[in-house]
Image (tube, rainbow, N blue to C red):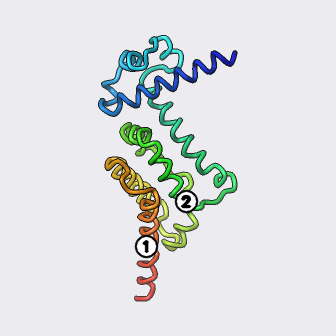
Amino acid sequence: MNTKNNRRRRESVERIEKAFIELLQSKELNEITVSNICKLCDLNRSTFYANYIDIYDLAEKVRTHLEEEVNRLYEAEQQQKFNSNDYLRLFRHIKENQLFYRTYFKLGYDNQFKLKYYDIHQAKRHFDNQHIEYHIEFFRSGFNAMVKKWLKGGCQETPEEMEEIIRSEYQGRSELLEQDKTL
């Protein structure tokens, strides 16, 4: 395929996704039509259907795109099979891409998201290797709720402040475990 057509297709996809995300800020997914999107981004319906099966396919591709982007943030760690617990990188990405993350949560994808790179070794140390799957679920749910609240408030706190909140939760848990052992 020639480069000009590839570039044109990429630009069309970007325009469609941008229009979709914009519409999602004021409408529910089932209220958005292909016509709404095409009108907003000034493209033909045939261009939409050349790239997506329907609105739900578009929503799924937007989700995949965001998850791939987040995975790229931690690509080196994944390849080396270690977890730096660097939440600052993620909080910076969230702040820079608020609209995408609001869309991700609005579509309910956070309920389907599974933590692939949770620090199992740290959890085993903190929780005496007990009920790790529950601790992972607790962390995932709490983390998602925290990010949603931060997004809802327009990300007023800095990424550094948000990372400190996460760190203090871990630290508080470690201190509680140490107190329990001395009682």
Q: In this view, does 104 lie above or below 114?
A: above
| Element marked by disc 1 | helix
Q: Which residue is drawn at 69% across and 56% down?
A: 80
Contact flag, marks 2 and 1 (Cβ < 8 Å): no
- Left or right of 13: which side holds 158? left
Q: Which residue is drawn at 58% across and 48% down?
A: 73
Q: Residue at x 41, y 25 (%)?
A: 19
- Left or right of 143: which side holds 80? right
Residue type pointed to by label 1 = Arg
Q: Could you say which is closer to the camera, residue 39 or residue 143?
A: 39
Quadrant of image for the N terminus: top right
Which residue, given by chain and number where applicable, does mark 2 sit on?
86
Location of residue 180 (image quadrant): bottom left
Give the numbered dot on residue 173: 1
- Left or right of 142: which side holds 26? left
| Element marked by disc 2 | loop
- Percent position of residue 161, x then y: 42, 62
Quadrant of image for the C terminus: bottom left
Q: Residue at x 35, y 31 (%)?
A: 24
| Residue 61 visible within the image | yes
